[in-house]
Structures are given as structure tokens and as C-alpha cells.
Image (cartoon, grey):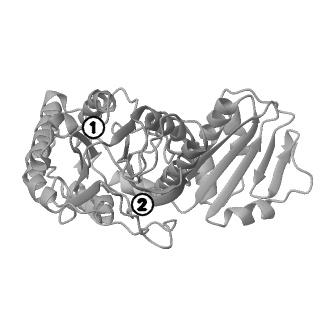
Amino acid sequence: MTDKGAGAQGPGVLCSDPARLKAERAADAAPAVSPLAPKGGFPALPRIAGIRLAAGTAGVRYRDRPDVMLAEVAPGSAIAGVFTRSATRAAPVRDCQIKLPCLQAGLTTRPVGIVINSGNANAFTGPAGTGSVCRVCAAAAAALGTSAGHILTASTGVIGELLPDGRITAILGPLAAALSDAGARAAAQAIMTTDTFPKGAAARAEVGGRTVSLAGIAKGSGMIAPDMATMLACIFTDCAVAPGVLQTMVSGLNAQTFNAITVDSDTSTSDSLLVCATGQAGNRLLGDATGAPAAAFSRALRTVMADLAGQVVRDGEGATKFIRISVQGAADDGSAASVGRAIANSPLVKTAVAGEDPNWGRIVMAIGKSGEPVDCDRIAIWFGEVLVAECGRVAPGYTEAAGAAHLKGTEIGITVDLGVGAGAATVRTCDLTGRYVAINAGYRS
């Protein structure tokens, strides 16, 4: 979870109600690891030449756990990013959106710093929030020997409470001294809120005869219905790629990965994805997005983005089932995506899956409410390999037992054919359980 609302008593005011305090303490406690978490745990990420990371404990909100990460990106790197389109986006997002075009105007000539804190979103905090960003950037710039214009920040946590930025600036000097090319896991842990496991992904590709490496970290568990980005993610690579080409790739791949997931249909104020390419792999600079070398790098980048996006869904608050919704036969790809999101965001569909109830009528309902073109007499629906409905009615031979058998697993497939065209899309989501309600009822909201 991230970016939840402030308490009713106002930003920064502690609640005196014992039951409320107990709920808040429960929200701060480390949750059990999601049953959908990758079985191998956090992966062994490659060390990316030109990238160093560190993490530390500032006490922004959480007690005795890392909550600030610092990344140093070498001079000469290309930076790309996508951010939430929320009308109430946080102060760090607005600051990044101002700085990024300047950093992309040419390869950076000084180190770039990235500072991310958890526990407080610094959103809906007015001029004070902007001041906090400025102070954090100034302190990070001093610690890294660069300019404030080369510092990008992100914050995640409670909305509407003033960021205690002094706690962050106090540890940036020690973090800079602790920077390491092996700090990815610690950084991933520091950006967690109600996440139950740190998220990392990696890939390699042959680009122009050179091996390039990619490593990424992300956080996200609730308030997940990205609109331009994911909750928070940083991806690093040693590939040499022009800033404009990198931005084009990131924006395009984002639509297929982070923007194709949902947990609860809510778009965060703080969604941010940053991709940094140091160019130290020694490959010939990718100056355009066409050709075999660019295609190879793009595939690897998509692998990392899709992996991280999938992990965010697998860590959905209270999730017990991972659901892949494939829509085909739509008027176009955009229409297919719209139908997929309508199904994925339906509380009735998600609770039916949680209860292992093959109530496919709820899928029919969600298709209808999407407002997209469909042919009712040609719609077909599958649970996994089980044909549930065809030609606009229940399929001959379908049994409830067969549908329920598929829903008893943890990897759920729902396929829909709308029968009107060649458009297709895949949306990934999770089920909705009572645990989701418990988590959010106990979070400061």
C-alpha cells in the first residue's frame, strides 16, 4: 500500500483513541509474506556499472526499518521516466516532471541522485511539500557533489501529512558514504510500505555484440491502478542508449506492463518509474529505436518491467490468487484493454475468484459495463482451458465443477473473445479478500 489519506484529526496529529492507535500499530507491523511471492525470494541482481545504491533508517514513519534509499547514477547517463497523471500528484512527482526534460536535453555531465522515502507521500502538502523536496534535493546534491537540478526524488506513504524532511536530510551524508554497487536489495526493502516482500528483476541482452545488463526494483501493494507508471520503480542498465530513444521505449513498454495491472482500481498520487542507462557496457550508442540492437534491448527492458509489474500484483494487499485476463476479438487493442480493466477492477469478479465461485455471469456484467463494442451473440469465455460460454450463452457440456476446479489454483486465467475484431490485450490483477479490508481499515486513512 502507499499514499493513503491522513487522519481525520489533521496532518501530523497523533490520534489519542486506543483502538485507533492499536490499528495504526498493527498497520506498521511487518505483514506475512504474500502466498503469491516468488518462491526463490529476492533475485540475484547484476551489478550495473555506473550505479551505486544505499539504504538507511530515518524514522519517517516506520520504526526500526529502512525507509530511505539513495542511488548515484554516473555522469553521462541517459534518464527516462513516466509519472502519474493524477490531478493531485505529489510534490516529488511535480519536481521530477520539471527536471527530467532538462536532464534529457543532453547526456548528464554530473552525477544524478535519486532519493526515495517510504512512510510519507509528501502529497497534498501545499508549499511546505515543495520546500521539503527542495531541502532533500539540496542535501543530496551536497552529499553526492552534484547540483540540486540533478536530484530526482519520490515519496510513498500517507497522504496529507507534512514530510519530516529533516530526518531524511540527516542521513543522506552517511548514505552517500555507504554507496555500493551491491545495494539493490537494501534499496528495494527501504521503499516498501505494506509490501510483504522486496521486488527485484533482471535481464541481459546481446546488443551490437556486447552483453548489456538490466536490474530493477519496485514497490507496490495497494492503491494500484497505474496511469502512466507503477507505484515506484527504478530500473538501471549499462546499455548505451540516447535519452530520446530510451524515453520512447519506456513510454511504449509501460502501456504493456505497469499500465496493464490493477489491484484495487485506485491510481496513486505518487506513481513514478525512472530508468537510468549509464552507457558503460561499451555497446554502440542506440541512436534510434529501430534495428536489431534496439529490438534486443527493448525486449530485455520489457522483461524487467513485466516481471516487476507482475510482482506488484502478486503482492496485492490480501491477495491469494494471481489473475491473468486475456481479451481478444475486440474492436482494437485499446478497446480490449478497456474490457480487461473492467473485468479486473470488478469487486464482484475479484471476490468470486477469492471464493472459488465460477460465477461467470459477473464477467458478462463487467464486459457490458465497459461501454466497448461487443457482439453478444459471439462472446466466448474461458476459465483456463475450460470453455464456459460461447455464442452468447453457456457452452454445451460446461459444468460448474469444471469451472470451480480451475479457480482452486493460485494462477487463474480468464479469457474473453468479444467477436467483433482483431484487438487484444492482457490485464493482470489479483483477487479481493477480507484481508484487503483489514489492512486498509487499520491503515491511517
**Who is closer to the viewer here, 278 or 381?**
278
Q: Earlier in the sequence, mark 2 or mark 1?
A: 1
Q: Which mark is residue 270?
A: none
Residue 269 is situated, as x and y percent measured from the top left of the image, at 34, 36
**Who is closer to the viewer here, 11 or 128?**
128
> Does residue 242 appear anywhere in the picture?
yes
> Does residue 314 appear anywhere in the picture?
no
Residue identified by numbered label 2:
200
Name the residue type under label 1: Thr
Tell which residue pokes out farthest to the bottom in this image: 40
Residue 45 against residue 286 in the figure, above or below: below
Q: Quadrant of the C terminus?
A: top left
Residue drawn at point x = 53 percent, y = 40 percent: 253
| Label 2 Cα crowd, 10 Å radius (few <14 / some 14-19 / many 20+) | many
Residue drawn at point x = 45 percent, y = 38 percent: 246
Closer to the observer: label 2 or label 1?
1
Q: Helix, strand, or loop for circle 2?
A: strand
Describe residue 53's horizontal placement relative to residue 230 as left or right. Answer: left
Q: How many marks?
A: 2
Residue 438 is situated, as x and y percent measured from the top left of the image, at 39, 57
Residue identified by numbered label 1:
108
Alpha carbon distance from label 2 to label 1: 26 Å
Residue drawn at point x = 84 percent, y = 59 percent: 399
Name the residue type under label 2: Gly
Tell which residue pokes out farthest to the right in this image: 396
Residue 142 is situated, as x and y percent measured from the top left of the image, at 9, 45
Residue 374 occupies quadrant:
top right
**Who is closer to the viewer here, 417 or 134?**
134
Describe residue 348's horizontal placement relative to residue 75 as left or right. Answer: right
Determine whether label 2 and label 1 are within 8 Å by CB: no
